[in-house]
Each structure stands twice: as structure tokens, then as C-alpha cells.
Amino acid sequence: MGLRKRSAALGAVAGAAAAALAIAGCSSGSSSSAANGSTGSASGSTSAPSTLTVWRMGGSVPSQVTWMNNVVAEFHKEFPQYAKTQVNVKWIPWGDRTTDWNNALSSGKNIPDITELGNTDTPTEAASGILASLNTDLNSWSGTSGLVKGMLANDTQDGTTYAVPWFGGVRAVWYRTDQFKKAGITSTPTTWAELEADAQKLQKAYPGTTGFDAITNDTNAFASFIWGAGGQIATQDSSGKWTADLTSPQTEAAIKYYVGLYTTAKVSAAKYIGETELGVAGATSGGPNEDFGLGKLDMYIDGSWAKATLPKNSVDTANIASFPIPSQNGPDPAPVFSGGSDLAVFKTSPNQQAAWDLISVMDNPANSTSFAALSGFFSPYSAEISKSENTGGAFNAGFAKAALNGQTAPLNAKNWPTADNGKLNIIPTMLKQLMQGAPFDSTVAAANTQLANVLNTGSAS
């Protein structure tokens, strides 16, 4: 789902397998018929199927099984024609999802009627032809108008929408309210200059701490600085060609500011060069997440979902709060990468209308909000997000405000994993080199050329 790099399995809450009531945590025995050829609606057969198969990503936990059981009961009540339809849930490991989708499409066997997919998966899978169009369904669905526009736009290609956003997560800046008060900071920063100044005040008030974690290995977080300056990482034209934008004035301003948090402002530490939020690549501890929990780091960027991963001996947890990542000049926050999961109808499902009807219940405002709350995420509905800004306490406030301004491209591009994972890590490598003293112009230009090549061809050469 693109929320963080610590583990692909964190796209859903992992846990022990469970099954209850109408939900079966096993593969469906049904097989596919040929695609029905619908171009505007997940229409399929209008008769009530004996089963509907839902593919969920990750591992089953009892709270999610209970949630789904309640949804199925609501589905049967709202659509009495499906009163005898059994809903089977199959749990797919995140790392297996692409292979399983392709196998289902090519073999026509054991296909899902509904599949969860990470929102960074949706554009690629829609282009591959495995998802049914939802246009007609969305035109008549009461939930459509309330969805966050940017989330729905991610699921739309050339005027056709192939999925609906189900839940999302964003990053914000974590801080402690009591520490801000002691440092004389009366309001959270809304500009880059204020963020830097506040980090310096905190370091002065709390000697031996680091004001902010300018880590190099979290492009999803760094993207907000680029977007907050009015820049882009890369843009795609109508023909599908990508242009890398790292050398634009706006993006270069973001790069210089972020690198300068370490090199000139001295509010970040050398240890964060080459680190993710959890530490060095592959580590599960030793990074800013742990440092913040233990009071060694004053502010850091992470998602709301990460609260459960703070060290057990964390200090002053009652005063942890959040604010949106500032934009260059304020007052509005910077856009944030909005990761999460979508729901889609499998194109070769013979039960497309029933599948959509179940999605409409799973993803209505009340159910999507209650599901998101199970694992620290947000509903895809603007009104529900705004409500949580006022009712979710100081910790959730910053995340809720940030979630209203989500962005995904180009972090959902087909070749983005090649650009941002493995041995390339184009932007993290560039930031690391700059923090270690590499010349700015040539380093950024080289990264820009490499990024364009990878996005367009899948290869760095």
C-alpha cells in the first residue's frame, strides 16, 4: 500500500488466522466465466451467487473477522436478494498479491470477486486489465461525492475508475506538547523557517537531543517537502512519458532546505544519513522511531500507525501530538503521500453486480471509518477525516488535517519500485551524497537523468 518501507506485510495488520460465522478464511472453490465485456459498470450476472470471494491482503485477526461478519450481516439486510450468499475471505500475503492476481486472470480458476489492493497497485493493475470498470456504479452510489478527490483520482485512468479508496494513512510531524511549551513554542510551525527555528529552540531547551530527523531513506516523507515548495518529483504527459523534475527551481529549493537541516542548520544528526524511520536498511530498531520514543529526538516524521511500534520503555507518551508537514511558506500544509488500500471488482468475476453491492456496504462512510480505526488509519471520506481532526485528540489532529491533501503520483508509477528500492534508491542516494558533501548541481542532475530513465524504461541505463 506504499505507506512505509519497513515491511510489505504492514499493508494490513498481521495476526493469527481466524474464521467465524459467514466468513471463511479459505480459498473459494468457484471458478471464473469469461469476462462480461462491460465497459461502464461491474454488472455481470444479476442473479444471486451462492458465494462471493473476497481477497484481503495480509493476515487475518479476530477484530477484522468480527468487522467483516457485521458487514456481511448488513449486506444481507440491505440486499435481501443475497440473503443466502456466503461471503468467503481469502487472506493473501502482500508479497504474493501480483502473482496470485496474474494466476487467477490467466487460469480462470479460484478467482476473487472482490480484491483489496494497495493504492499504489491500482494504476498498474488497472492497466494490466484485471479490474472491472466501476463508472456506472459510482455515478449512482451515494458515497461517491464524499470521497477525497485525490484518492479517487488515483483509481481513475482515462476517465474510467477501476477501484474505490477504502482507507488511507499519511505522515505528519510528531512532537510533545510539554516540550514545545518549555521551549517557548506557542504554536506549531507552518513554514520551513519556523520548523527549523523550532528545532533549534528544542535542542537548546533539551541539551543533547536532536531537533529533527532529516533521514535520507524515506522518499515518501521527503516528497512532502518537494510538493510543499510547489515542485514535483516527476510528471507524466498524455502519451505516458515521464519527465523527471528534480532539477526544477522548486524541487531544488526543497532539496537544499532538507539537506541543510543537517549541513547548515545543525538540527539533524549524522546518524540519520542512510537511515529509514527504523534505522539502517533492514533494521527494526535504532532509528528515529526509537530515539523519539526515548526522548532523544524532539520531532520526527512518521505515520499514525507507528504509535504501536514505539519502544515499550518510551517516555512522556501522554504528551505526544502531531502537526502537518509544513509547506515552504505556509500557511497551508504541504501535500502528503496518501498510502492505503482500495477495493475493486475482478474483471473476470461472474458476479460483478453482487461484488459491487458488497463493496458499497464495506466502503460506506460508517464501515470504512470503523475499519480504518482498527489499525490507526483514516476513512477515505472528507467529512469523516475532518470530524476526526476535532475528536481524535492531539495525536490524531495533525494527521487528519494532512490527510485532506493527499497525493500519490509518481509514487504509484509502474517503475517506481525500481527507482526507489533495491540497489538504486535514487532519491535517498542523492540526499545521502549531498549531506556528505557531494557537489549539488552535478549530483542532482545525475539523479534526475537516472530517474527519468528508470520511470520510462525500468532500467537505469
Image (cartoon, rainbow, N blue to C red):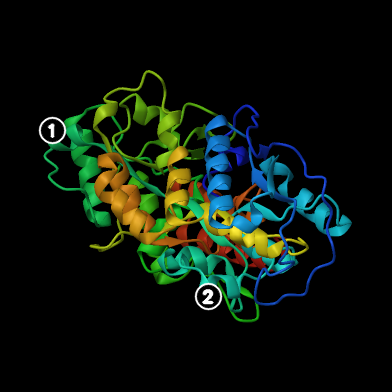
Q: Residue furthest top?
A: 313
Q: Position of residue 339 (x, y in %)?
A: 51, 52
Looking at the image, is mark 2 or mark 1 nearer the viewer?
A: 2
Left or right side of 449 for 441: left
Residue 253 vs residue 62, the one in the foreground = 62
Q: Position of residue 295 (x, y in %)?
A: 30, 26
Between discs 2 and 1, the one toward the N terminus = 2
Residue 350 vs residue 1, the one in the foreground = 350
Q: Residue furthest bottom?
A: 238
Q: Which mark is residue 139?
A: 2
Left or right side of 171 for 46: right
Examine the image and state in which quarter residue 120 appears: bottom right
> Quadrant location of the C terminus?
bottom right
The crowding category of the residue bearing disc 2, from other C-alpha atoms within 10 Å (few below 14, some 14 to 19, many at least 20), is few
Question: Dot 2: what SS?
Answer: helix
Residue 149 shows up from this direction: yes
Q: Position of residue 34 (x, y in %)?
A: 84, 66
- What's under tag 1, amino acid-wise? Lys
Residue 325 vs residue 11, the one in the foreground = 11
Q: Which mark is residue 250?
A: none
Q: Which mark is residue 182?
A: 1
Q: Residue at x 55, y 62 (%)?
A: 164
* Picture layout, residue 53 above or below residue 348: above
Left or right side of 435 for 61: right
Numbered-mark total = 2
Alpha carbon distance from label 2 to label 1 = 53 Å
Question: Dot 1: what SS?
Answer: helix
